[in-house]
Image (cartoon, rainbow, N blue to C red):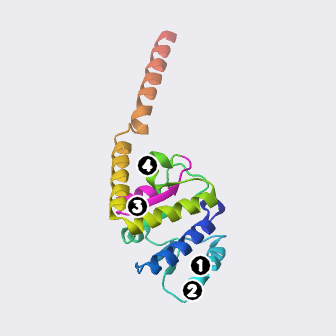
Amino acid sequence: MTRQKRPLLAAAMLNWACDYLTSLNFEFSAKIVGDGHYLDGFKKITAIHQNTDHFEFLPSTTDTQKVLNQSDLIIIPSENEGITLVAFEAFQNGCIPISTNVGAQNEFIPPSSLLPSYPLIAYFYWKNILMRIAESDEFVAKLIDNQVALAKEFASNTSASESLEGIYRANFELCKSTSQLLL
């Protein structure tokens, strides 16, 4: 619950999702994992639902794999990222990641699941994506297919170890030949 993760934006997104999905008679629950400076603000934003069991606050020590395995979606509204580990964990557990298009998120999360980085615009894109999810099984299938395709593409990339091995080997050979010249 740090500023960079934009938890207050996540709270607003989840508040709207709760109202929207319950109005359509969907079962809705949000598990919020973590603690930190913005936890109180998050709770204040979601206080409108305080007498319901829609929001569950869990400590940062919670088994996130278990939570993701029980979840359909995860929102990652961060201000900046590289590629988040939680996006990989979500995918691995059958949970669709919806993320802001920051850092290298677009290398693993398909365009149909990306939100603009500006908070207000991200909020409106989130609403649009969630409405389409609620209304169309075909859209959900497309989100999943796009995620699987991008995950396969990502997995086929050369690893950092493989990329660096050639550089290290070339430098080692250069050093070895240079040292032989000096002897």
Q: Where is residue 73 in the image (x, y as percent from the top left)?
A: 43, 66
Q: Identify the amino acid type marked 1.
A: Thr
Q: Badge 2: few (under 14), some or many (20 or more) residues near its Cα, within 10 Å?
A: few
Which residue is disc 4 drawn over?
A: 108
Looking at marks 4 and 3 on the same chain, the residue that comes earlier in the sequence is marked by 3
Circles 2 and 1 in contact, beta carbons < 8 Å: yes
Looking at marks 4 and 2 on the same chain, the residue that comes earlier in the sequence is marked by 2
Mark 2–mark 3 Cα distance, whole angstroms, equals 26 Å
Which residue is disc 1 drawn over?
A: 46
Which residue is disc 3 drawn over?
A: 96
Q: Does the magenta stretch include residue 177?
A: no
- Bounds of the magenta span? 86-103
Q: Does the magenta stretch include residue 88?
A: yes
Q: Identify the amino acid type marked 4.
A: Phe
Q: Identify the amino acid type marked 3.
A: Ile
The local secondary structure at tag 1 comes to helix
Q: Which mark is residue 50?
A: 2
The local secondary structure at tag 3 comes to strand
Quick one: 141 or 7, which is closer to the camera? 141
Quick one: 67 or 97, which is closer to the camera? 97
